[in-house]
Image (spheres, helix red, strand yellow):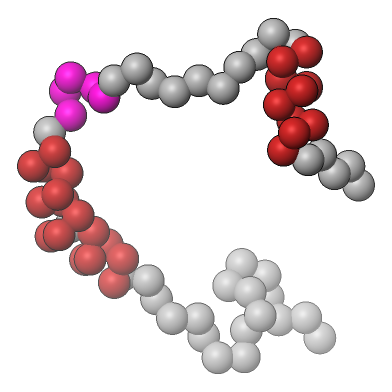
Amino acid sequence: MLFVTVEGTWRLLKRHGWSWQQPARRAIERDDGAVELWKKEVWPQVKARRRPAEPGLSSRTRPVSR
């Protein structure tokens, strides 16, 4: 297993000519009011739709091993 420190990651990026980048500005099309409305009204409904795991199953994707 390979472990790389944060400092080592930056050195590796610099060695290859890469740098940390950050967007210069937000998208012009962004509508902060619509984002806040979505967070308040839609996200709670989406988040609440998670179905509980069935008892006795370790995984919903694999059958019970015997």
Residue drawn 29% across the image and 72% down it:
48
The image quadrant that residue 33 belongs to is: top left
Q: Residue furthest top?
A: 17
Q: Residue furthest right?
A: 1
| Residue 49 image position (x, y, % from top left) | 31, 70
Question: 41 or 13, which is in the foreground?
Answer: 13
Q: How many marks?
A: 0
Q: Residue at x 71, y 81 (%)?
A: 64
The answer to which of 66 and 28 lies nearer the viewer is: 28
Rendering coords of residue 16 (x, y %):
75, 11
Magenta stretch in the rendered image:
26-30
From the viewer's perspective, is 57 left or right of 33?
right
The main secondary structure of the magenta stretch is loop
Q: Is residue 6 above or below residue 28?
A: below
Q: Is residue 28 magenta?
A: yes
Give the left or right position of residue 7, taking residue 2 as reference: left
Provide residue 3's location: percent of width, then percent of height: 85, 44
Q: Quadrant of residue 4?
A: top right
Instruction: Say if 62 sits above or below 4 in the image.
Output: below
Q: Residue at x 13, y 60 (%)?
A: 41
Q: Quadrant of residue 22?
A: top left
- In the depicted structure, whether residue 60 falls above or below residue 8: below
The residue under the point 81% across, 86% down is 66
| Residue 13 within the magenta-colored segment of the rendering | no
**Residue 37 rendering spot, x and y as whole percentages:** 10, 51
36 lies left or right of 56: left
| Name of the residue lying farthest toward the bottom | 55
